[in-house]
Structure formats: C-alpha cells, structure tokens
Image: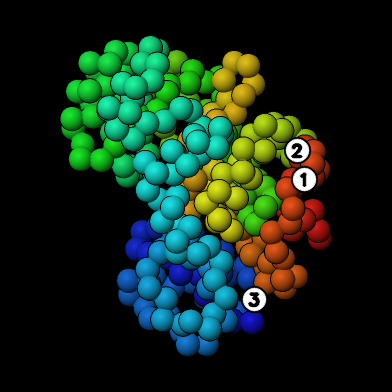
C-alpha cells in the first residue's frame, strides 16, 4: 500500500525521510515543493493541514484536528473545560469575572516554544500582557515538579520523555532537544500523565500527537498542548515508523479507553511486537 508522509518545509525535512526509509513503500514529501502522488493510498499529515488533492487516500491525522491543536488559545480552553488543563480564560473581562488571585500566564493565540510567555501575579499585570495581543488566553499558573511529553498514536502511548531543565524554578522549561530530556521506561510512565495525554488526543480527534504535560507537587497532571510535528530523536524516528507500519498493515483503529491507566494498558502494541 503506497504511503505518503506529507510535511511542510522545515517541519519534518530532516526526520520524515528517515521515517519513510524504515517503512515499506513509503515516501516523504515536502508539500511546498512536490505535488501529492496520485498513487498515494495513505497520507500521514505531519503538522500539515493544507488542501489534499487526493480525495481517495486514507488520511492519518485529519486537517481539522491539526488546526484544532495548532490554535493554542482554543485548544487550551478545550482542555481546561474538560478538566485536564489549568483554568483558562479567553478574554480579560471573563478573567475578571472569576477568582483573580494567584499567578497567571498570558500567551498569544498561537505561539511556539517558550516565546511570548507572560508571567503575571496581579490583575494589572494580566491586563498589560493582554494588551500586547489581538488574540490571547489567560491560564492559571501551576507550579510544576516535573514535565513530560507523551507520544501517542490512535488511543495508545508509544513513548514518553521527561524534560530536564537547567533551572527547575523557571516558569518555562524550554524545548525538548538532545541533552534536555530523559527517556522514561514503560514501567515508570505516570498513570495520570498517560490518562490526560490520551484524553487530549480524544478531544482533538488526532491520530498522532506529542502531548506536553506538567505535574504538580500532588501528582496531578495538566495538559499544556499537543504537537503534531514534534522534535524526534533517532529512537523516536524508529518508534514512529513502527506505529505507522502497524497502523497500515494491521488496519489499527482507536481502541476504547482502558479502565486502568498503567503502562501495560496504554502502551501501543507496535512497541511490544517483534
């Protein structure tokens, strides 16, 4: 079955060809430079939500779901209203209608990495931060003791990393590049992290995503965002190739949510098969 991994520009230029090399009859293309092959039977959208000219192809990661996750403002509100993210407001007036005590984060509707992060401790500071942007969100600041990224594919987790910041007291712990994270063995996956990761995936209706999650001192997990074109180390390039291959060969569909959220119940079967 001819599979195409469609990425856009720098998002995937280094990693997606490597994923394709590990799969059978799979090609990675930059949709800004190459037209979609008419022979494609399966198209995996790697952070790309543009028009797909092949209506017959089966799509992994729908465009609407990628857009849902990409607009951080509405995505955070979606998660917050479901109880898996910090309390979130989409306007200053809405914020004033609630309990304004404590610490808050203000960010523009769309952002990347640790840029445009405003830490506020008073309503006046929140107002000043909101004035910087046409569209923004206000989110309750949660002091964290750990931060994870859970790689998920159709209802199961297939890998997890823990961030290793230079300063554990900083508001933002930066990005997950080589040397700034550690691999988390399956048996050490926190159950609440797995639970909220899969819930975030279900809310966005994404097939694939890397869910960023913080954990407070009481062990409660909160979703920050879902990335549809995340950084991948060599190990996770191989892992993604495995789950994509499993999906295509086994015709894997999203299973029911497990009753018990431990690593044995949430791990993707592609990672345990030879």
* Residue ID at (67%, 72%): 248
Please report whichever mark, 3 or 2, sits nearer to the chain's N-terminal start: 3
Q: State which quarter of the image contains the C terminus.
A: bottom right
| One can see residue 17 in this view | no
Residue 48 % position (x, y): 41, 63
Residue 180 % position (x, y): 50, 33
Q: Indicate left or right for 142 with 252 as reference.
A: left
Q: Indicate left or right for 174 with 247 as reference.
A: left
Position of residue 123 relative to residue 136, above or below, is above
- Along the line of sight, the residue nearer the viewer: 164 or 222: 222
Position of residue 146 relative to residue 41, above or below, is above
Is there a contact, CB below 8 Å, between mark 1 and mark 2?
A: yes
Q: Which residue is mark 2?
A: 261
Spatial separation of the CA atoms under disc 1 and disc 2: 6 Å
Q: Secondary structure at mark 2?
A: loop
Residue 202 % position (x, y): 60, 50
Please report whichever mark, 3 or 1, sits nearer to the chain's N-terminal start: 3
Identify the image quadrant of residue 199: top right
Identify the image quadrant of residue 25: bottom right
Q: Which residue is mark 3?
A: 24
Dot 3, crowdedness within 10 Å: few (<14), some or many (≥20)? few
Give the numbered dot on residue 258: 1
């Amino acid at each position: 079955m001819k599979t195409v991994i469609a990425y856009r520009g720098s998002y995937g230029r280094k990693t997606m060809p490597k994923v394709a090399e590990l799969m059978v009859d799979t090609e990675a293309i930059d949709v800004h430079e190459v037209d979609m092959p008419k022979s494609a039977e399966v198209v995996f959208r790697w952070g790309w939500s543009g028009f797909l000219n092949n209506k017959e192809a089966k799509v992994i990661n729908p465009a609407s779901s990628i857009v849902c996750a990409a607009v951080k403002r509405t995505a955070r509100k979606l998660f917050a209203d479901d109880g898996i993210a910090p309390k979130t407001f989409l306007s200053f007036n809405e914020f004033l209608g609630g309990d304004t005590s404590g610490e808050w984060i203000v960010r523009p509707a769309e952002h990347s990495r640790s840029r445009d992060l405003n830490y506020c401790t008073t309503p006046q500071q929140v107002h000043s931060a909101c004035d910087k942007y046409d569209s923004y969100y206000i989110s309750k600041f949660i002091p964290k003791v750990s931060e994870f990224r859970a790689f998920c594919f159709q209802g199961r987790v297939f890998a997890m990393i823990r961030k290793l910041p230079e300063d554990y007291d900083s508001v933002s712990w930066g990005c997950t590049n080589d040397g700034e994270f550690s691999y988390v063995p399956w048996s050490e996956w926190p159950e609440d992290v797995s639970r909220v990761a899969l819930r975030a995936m279900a809310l966005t209706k994404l097939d694939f995503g890397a869910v960023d999650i913080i954990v407070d001192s009481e062990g409660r997990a909160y979703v920050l965002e879902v990335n549809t074109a995340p950084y991948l180390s060599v190990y996770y390039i191989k892992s993604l190739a495995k789950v994509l291959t499993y999906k295509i060969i086994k015709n894997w569909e999203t299973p029911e949510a497990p009753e018990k959220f431990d690593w044995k119940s949430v791990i993707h079967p592609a990672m345990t098969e030879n």
